[in-house]
Every structure is written in C-alpha cells, then in structure tokens.
C-alpha cells in the first residue's frame, strides 16, 4: 500500500470516528399543532318584552242620554213683595210659588212658647175674623181661624210652671181647643203676647210673613217653615 493510500484511509477513519463521538444535535421539541377552535356563531338575542294587554273597551250600547233642562223661570202675574224676593228666589220660582195676591200690612200679634210660636194676623179690611199661625220648632206649621170674640173665656186659671204663662184670648183658645192645652206640642207660653204690624203675602202654595221684629217666615204648604 502506498503512502498516499494509507493517508487517505487515516483521514477517513478520523472522520468516521469524529462523527461517532460528536454529541447528537439537541432534539427539537415536537410542536403539536393546537387545533383551532371552530368559531361558534352566537346569535345576539334581544330580550322580548311582552306588550301590556290592553283590555278591549266594551262596545257602547245605544243608550239614550237624557239631557236635563233647567226649569224655565215663570213670569208671575202678581209681583212678589220686595222684602220677600231673596227667599222667594232661593226657594225656586215656579208656577206654584207665584204670589196669589199682593202683600198687605195688617195688625198682628206674636207670642213665644217653649217649643214654637204663634202669630195672629188681622183679617183683610172689612173682615172681622183673623188668622192664627202656629209654628212648631220641629218645622211643622198650621193655620187656624181666630174665632175668639169679646165676652168668651179669656183664660182658664191654670197654674203654669215658674217663668211660664198661660196664653189668652185667641191664642189661648187655639192652644186649649186645638192643640191640647198643657199637653200641646208647643208647651207653655214663655211670655205674654206682643202686638205690632205684620206683612203677609199669600202664595199659590203657601205664604210669606214679615213679623214686626224683622224676621221673614216662609210657610210652604206641606213642608217645613223657614225663617230669615
């Protein structure tokens, strides 16, 4: 073997030996591909709000509507006496509430009782008979003709309680004969009668009376009296 050939084999041997002794190249970590997550399509959900239930309106019935008309003011043939006008208008002007005659001022008297009062009104001029008005505090009222005349019993001599008096003349006669005397709903008189002028005006359904102390009385038929 020639020198050159021997040298060649020496070099090859060295190369082979170096390759065997060389450290293996560092291993590369195996990279595992992470599978891509499939994109999930999420539909945006809008919350649904239930619309409020509106109740159905009932179908209107064809019900006739009655329109109340104010009562027309009646024109009365006889004028109301001016002092009575305010109370007369407040009571409501109607055909039944019209004056039946003109007002007149006459002689009169008044007497107070425990539970009411009496008025005496002289009759129209030329009339001998007057009228007695009985007004109870409860609201009831009555008219009685004054039938007492001079010479009749004036009083019966009853003994009234202290501070009370027995009514006399026409008042006493109505009190005893029509109202029951001591059992009368009026009770005993609390003073002696007083005289003066009164003004009266008859209505178709009652009357007005203005006493001499300035009080006006409305006396409607079948209803309670009122005063102002």
Image (cartoon, grey):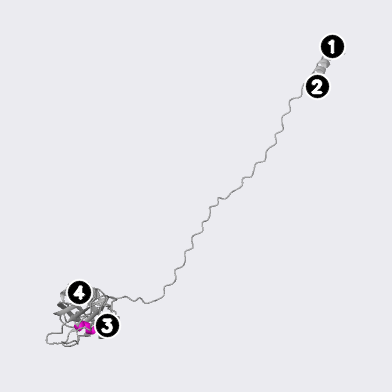
From which residue to which does the magenta span run? 169-174
Q: Which mark is residue 133?
A: none
Please tell me in which quadrant of the rendered image residue 37 appears. top right
Instruction: State the SS at label 2.
Output: helix
Q: Was residue 13 drawn as part of the magenta stretch in this picture?
A: no
Q: Which mark is residue 20?
A: 2
Query: Which one is nearer the viewer's eye here, 175 or 5?
Result: 175
Instruction: State the SS at label 3.
Output: helix
Instruction: State the SS at label 1.
Output: helix
Mark 3, residues whose alpha carbon is within 10 Å: few (<14), some, or many (≥20)? some
Label 4 sits on residue: 216
Disc on the earlier residue, 1 or 4? 1
Mark 4, residues whose alpha carbon is within 10 Å: few (<14), some, or many (≥20)? many
Disc on the earlier residue, 3 or 4? 3
At x 80%, y 21%, the residue is: 20
Label 3 sits on residue: 181
Disc on the earlier residue, 3 or 2? 2
- The overriding secondary structure of the stretch rendered in magenta is helix
């Amino acid at each position: 073997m020639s020198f050159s050939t021997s040298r060649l084999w020496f070099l090859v041997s060295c190369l082979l030996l170096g390759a065997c002794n060389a450290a293996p190249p560092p291993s590369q970590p195996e990279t595992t591909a992470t599978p891509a997550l499939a994109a999930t399509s999420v539909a945006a959900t809008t919350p649904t709000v239930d619309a409020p239930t509106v109740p159905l309106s009932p179908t209107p019935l064809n019900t006739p509507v009655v329109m109340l008309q104010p009562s027309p003011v009646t024109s009365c043939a006889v004028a109301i006496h001016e002092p009575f006008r305010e109370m007369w208008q407040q009571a409501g002007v109607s055909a039944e509430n019209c004056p039946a005659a003109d007002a007149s001022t006459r002689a009169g008297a008044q007497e107070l009782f425990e539970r009411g009062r009496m008025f005496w009104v002289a009759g129209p001029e030329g009339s001998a008979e007057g009228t007695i008005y009985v007004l109870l505090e409860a609201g009831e009222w009555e008219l009685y003709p004054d039938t007492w005349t001079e010479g009749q019993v004036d009083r019966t001599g009853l003994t009234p309680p202290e501070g009370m008096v027995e009514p006399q003349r026409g008042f006493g006669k109505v009190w005893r004969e029509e109202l029951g005397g001591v059992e009368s709903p009026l009770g005993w008189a609390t003073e002696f009668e007083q005289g003066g002028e009164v003004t009266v005006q008859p209505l178709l359904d009652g009357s007005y009376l203005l006493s001499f102390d300035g009080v006006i009385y409305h006396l409607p038929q079948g209803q309670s009296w009122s005063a102002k």
